[in-house]
């Protein structure tokens, strides 16, 4: 229900602007509830390009409790990473003495646009906030949208994708398959040190994932289906055959219906060297 409401706010009410296309996938972890990864494609007039646009939609600072106490409480509860680093070296994100999520971030007075696919958001040095037994600042705040956070009162990480490199992680979730765990089964007292025979990859299904699948909720969804069409000249489509069966493969290819055959006369406007460079050579 929350996911449907979130998509309706984003796509129909346009809190980020006009959405041309979207895709989401549901991920299950071995702890906590399922969560959705959503990628939006905005139209040209709504695209987030400048520093002012980024600051308008994404925030990485604690709100002033005197101005908006409720929002400050939600950020403190839902949008703080860790804390980790030197003040908590035993946190789950720590790898070889460093946070695998690169927290704590550096203070920044102004937002920087495209840096390795993501912006570096503004994080000004302000007064610290007490989170549990730790006193932390804006360096541990996960990027969020003020309106979404206040409306849903949940962890909603909002990022601006400034490069195609930063959206690849989302699509791999569609194909990564189910969660798995290494399981070893042996009789009591028996010792078997053969690593290959001892461990079996087992499917790992927790209660939330089982509930999701039993109710037949969508595990992924996309607004548009895109099919890549192979462009080729007449009688020059690729044919796969086995040795000695070339004639049969050619006969099958002649009868096979394909999505697209480039056989129409080329319009004069594109029958130029520009057309040749684009379709017939990599130069």
Image (spheres, helix red, strand yellow):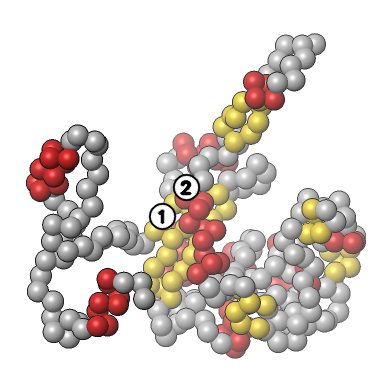
Cβ–Cβ under 8 Å for marks 2 and 1: no
Compute the Cα span from label 2 to label 1.
Answer: 13 Å
* Relative horizontal placement of residue 274, taking residue 108 as reference (left or right): left
Which residue corresponds to the image point at 41% horizontal and 83% vertical from the top-left? 44
Give how far across and how far down residue 223 sits, in percent. 36, 62
Check disc 1 and report its element: helix, strand or loop: strand
Q: Is residue 184 above or below residue 125?
A: above
Reading the image, the residue beneath label 2 is 175
Number of on-image labels: 2
Q: Pick whichever of labels 2 and 1 is earlier in the sequence.
A: 2
Q: Is residue 267 left or right of residue 181?
A: left
Where is residue 71 shown, x and y percent of the image? 70, 72
Q: Is residue 188 visible?
A: no
**In this view, 236 is above or below 268:** above
Place of residue 230 in the rendered image (x, y in percent of width and height, measured from the top left):
25, 60
Crowding near the residue tagged with mark 2, few <14, some 14–19, many ≥20 C-alpha atoms within 10 Å: few
Residue at x-position 86% and y-position 74%? 128
Residue hosting label 1:
221
Q: Which part of the image, by quadrant, shows the C terminus?
A: bottom left
Looking at the image, is mark 2 or mark 1 nearer the viewer? Answer: 2
Which quadrant would residue 137 be assigned to in this image?
bottom right
Question: Seen in the image, is 259 located left or right of residue 95?
Answer: left
């Amino acid at each position: 229900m929350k996911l449907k409401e979130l998509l309706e706010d984003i796509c129909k009410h346009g809190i980020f602007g006009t959405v041309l296309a979207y895709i989401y996938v549901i991920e299950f972890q071995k702890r906590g509830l399922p969560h959705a990864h959503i990628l939006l494609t905005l139209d040209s007039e709504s695209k987030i390009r400048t520093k002012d646009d980024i600051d308008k939609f994404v925030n990485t600072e604690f709100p002033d409790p005197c101005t908006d106490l409720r929002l400050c409480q939600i950020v403190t509860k839902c949008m703080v990473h860790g804390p980790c680093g030197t003040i908590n070296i035993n946190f789950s994100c720590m790898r070889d003495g460093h946070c695998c999520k690169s927290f704590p971030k550096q203070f920044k007075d102004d937002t920087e646009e495209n840096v390795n696919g993501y912006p570096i958001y503004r994080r000004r040095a302000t007064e610290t906030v007490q989170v549990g037994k730790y006193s932390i600042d804006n360096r541990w705040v996960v990027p969020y949208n003020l309106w979404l956070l206040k409306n849903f009162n949940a962890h909603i990480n909002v990022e601006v994708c400034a490069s195609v490199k930063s959206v690849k992680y989302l699509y791999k979730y569609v194909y990564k398959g189910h969660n798995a765990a290494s399981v070893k089964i042996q009789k009591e007292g028996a010792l078997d040190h053969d690593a290959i025979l001892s461990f079996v990859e087992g499917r790992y299904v927790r209660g939330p994932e089982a509930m999701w699948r039993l109710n037949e909720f969508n595990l992924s969804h996309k607004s548009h289906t895109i099919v890549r069409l192979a462009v080729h000249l007449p009688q020059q489509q690729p044919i796969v055959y086995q040795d000695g069966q070339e004639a049969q493969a050619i006969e099958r290819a002649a009868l096979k219906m394909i999505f697209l055959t480039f056989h129409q006369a080329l319009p004069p406007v594109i029958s130029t060297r520009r057309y040749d460079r684009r379709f017939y050579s990599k130069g």
